[in-house]
Image (cartoon, rainbow, N blue to C red):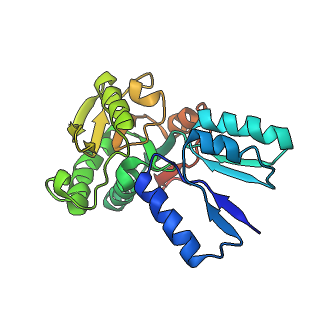
Amino acid sequence: NCAILKPSEVSKATEKLLAELIPKYLSQDCFAVLCGGAEETKLLLENRFDHIFYTGSQSVARCILQSAAVHLTPVTLELGGKSPCLIYGRLDMKSAAKRLVWAKFFNAGQSCVAPDYVLCPVETRDLLIPLIKEVLESFYGSDPQQSPDLGRIVTEKHWNYLTKLLESSEGKVVIGGDSIKETRYFAPTVVVDVAETDALMKEEIFGPILPILTIKSLDEGIAFINKKEKPLAVYVFSDEP
């Protein structure tokens, strides 16, 4: 099997690294890397392929599907979404907080399968917040801006999106909230008192902002998730069967 890899032009350093490493370690008869933007992608899609796998936004996915339809090429799409984290019942809260913080703030929240928001009872939320603070400090220190382990937002455009999203929220910031445009730094941020209609709940966040919504029962949490669009992942911490 042969493959052509087209990395995102947005992540320039990663694109360059892949273009250097793949020819070095894999057969050039079987693998190739194409760098470039929309024009290069358009030209690439004019070719007939056996299969196309795409990870990214819905808008680009629609263009890919239109191009693939010309040759009836099968397509697999991995488009992200608002993946929920449901926490309910008696459990090891410190362990849950550690796993939640790692999954959410890895790569500054820029991961398609990152937990997008948390659903939990109010008493669980009140136990969870100080544990999140504790884990964040153990991961990134008392000043996350100086941590070599906390990534930056990939583009200024997305930094602006996250900033506007947080400013539009009617929730209360209890952790973080600060950011610096020049370096595209965005602090790990937790927001409570978030309503279902809040700005943070309308689209995938894809960044280091974690809204926490409260529920009164496990059934309420399940119903909340089920009425939304199907996410890529669902994270559950519970002792309930």
The reply to whether residue 68 is in sight is: yes
The reply to whether residue 193 is in sight is: no
Residue 69 occupies quadrant: top right
Compared with residue 39, is residue 138 higher up or lower down, i.e. above or below?
below
Name the one closer to the observer, 116 or 218. Answer: 116
Q: Position of residue 44 (x, y in %)?
A: 69, 48
Name the one closer to the observer, 212 or 123. Answer: 212
Residue 91 occupies quadrant: bottom left
Total marks shown come to 0
Residue 18 lies left or right of residue 4; in this view the side is left
Residue 53 lies left or right of residue 131; in this view the side is right
Residue 140 lies left or right of residue 113; in this view the side is left
> In which quadrant will I find the N terminus?
bottom right
Q: Position of residue 238 (x, y in %)?
A: 47, 53
Q: Position of residue 177 (x, y in %)?
A: 23, 37
Q: Position of residue 204 (x, y in %)?
A: 48, 36
Residue 133 lies left or right of residue 58; in this view the side is left
> In which quadrant will I find the C terminus?
bottom right
Q: Residue furthest right?
A: 72
Who's the residue at 35% across and 28% down the image? 165
Name the one closer to the observer, 35 or 219. Answer: 35
Who's the residue at 71% across and 70% down the image? 30
Who's the residue at 44% across and 25% down the image? 196
Name the one closer to the observer, 163 or 89. Answer: 163
Compared with residue 99, is residue 185 higher up or lower down, i.e. above or below?
above
